[in-house]
Image (spheres, helix red, strand yellow):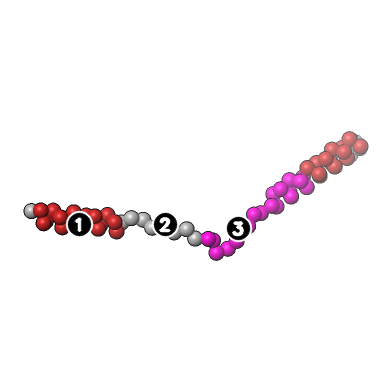
Amino acid sequence: MTGRRAIALLGLVLSVAACEPTVKVEAPKEPITINLNVKVDAEVRVKLEEQASQDIKNSPEIF
């Protein structure tokens, strides 16, 4: 019986070792890009809002 147990244990160990996941770390093929359009758009809006506030103060009858 010990021979069968040894073979069963060996088979169990090999099957568990075969199921281990493989993790690969690779660099991306394309470079990482960062889109800065949102920041530029926000700055333009602030400048336009400041100009609009000044225009309203200078000639409130237009609005």
Where disc 2 sits, the SS reads loop
Tell me the residue at 11%/56% (across/down).
Answer: 4
Image quarter in which the C terminus is found: top right
Q: Name the outermost residue toward the bottom.
A: 29
Splitting the image into 4 quarters, where does residue 3 fall?
A: bottom left
Circle 3 or circle 2, nearest the eye: 2
Instruction: Give the label on residue 24, or none.
Output: none
Amino acid marked by disc 3: Ile
Q: What stretch is highlighted in magenta?
A: 27-45
Residue shown at the point (18%, 54%) measured from the top left: 9
Report the disc number at residue 10: 1
Q: Give neighbour class at mark 1: few <14, some 14-19, many 20+ (Cα, 10 Å).
A: few
The residue lying toward the viewer, choosing from 22 and 3, is 3
What's under tag 2, amino acid-wise? Val
Residue carrying label 3: 32
User: In the image as oriented, which residue stretches furthest toward the left?
Assistant: 1
Q: Nearer the viewer's eye, disc 2 or disc 1?
A: 1
Determine contact: label 1, label 3, CB under 8 Å: no
Label 3 element class: loop
Dot 2 corresponds to which residue? Answer: 23
Q: Earlier in the sequence, mark 1 or mark 3?
A: 1
For the residues labelled 2 and 1, the Cα–Cα distance comes to 25 Å
Image side of residue 46 versus residue 57, left or right: left
Q: Where is residue 7 in the image (x, y as percent from the top left)?
A: 15, 57
Can residue 43 be found in the magenta stretch? yes
- Name the image quarter holding residue 55: top right
The amino acid beneath tag 1 is Leu
